[in-house]
Image (cartoon, rainbow, N blue to C red):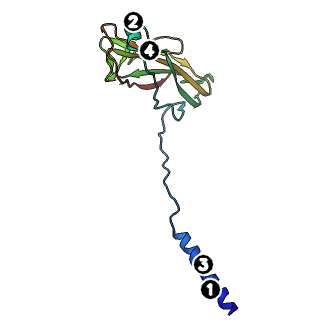
Amino acid sequence: MKISKIASAVVLTMGVASFAAQADQGSGKVTFWGSIIDAPCSIKNGYGDQRIELGQISNTHLDNGGISTPRPFDIELENCSFAKDSNGDPMFNTVTVTFNGGNVPNDMTMLAITGQAAGAGVRIQDYSGTMVTLDKPTAGRVLGIGDNTLSFSAYLEKIASVTNVTPGDFEAVTNFTLAYQ
């Protein structure tokens, strides 16, 4: 009788254990993605595609010649490593950035906005306060080995030829391209 109870307990335990092993107690999928680029630096994860909030800006402020508060954004480069020329000097350690996108008519320094708002555009400045011209490379920046930061800022401004800024939500999109020399 004692052996029968022990055998029953073992069979019951094994049955529960095998049932538990078969039950789905959570699963998922992890996908790793990216791209390998032909460049001396990598773009740090999260800095290739960015969303920069310019905030809620008064149309009256813009109509009176004001601009929104400039919002900083960076392009972070990491693991920079440079080939050396025959003299041992680094090659391709200077980078330019070219921003492109739809511009405001007759103004290549102002990115056009889309959405319900109208009459304003986005301007981009580099770290020194120099206005970025769309489709034109910025001044070259010399990079160091390791990690480097390319700093910019963006702000909203009324288009000079417009009488009044129309309130509403807006978006402006620019793509950037790095070029190493």
Q: Residue tagged by mark 2?
A: 64
In this rendering, the label closer to the viewer, 3 or 4 = 3
Q: Which mark is residue 14?
A: 3
Q: CA distance from mark 1 to mark 3?
A: 10 Å
**5 or 28, which lies in front?**
5
In this rendering, the label closer to the viewer, 2 or 3 = 2
Q: Position of residue 145 (x, y in %)?
A: 62, 27
For the N terminus, the quadrant is: bottom right
Q: Please name the amino acid that badge 3 sits on.
A: Met
Name which of mark 1 and mark 4 comes first in the sequence: 1
Q: CA distance from mark 1 to mark 4?
A: 80 Å
Helix, strand or loop at disc 3?
A: helix
Q: Residue tagged by mark 4?
A: 132
**Residue 36, placed above or below residue 69:** below
Q: CA distance from mark 3 to mark 4?
A: 71 Å
In the visual, does 132 lie left or right of 87? left
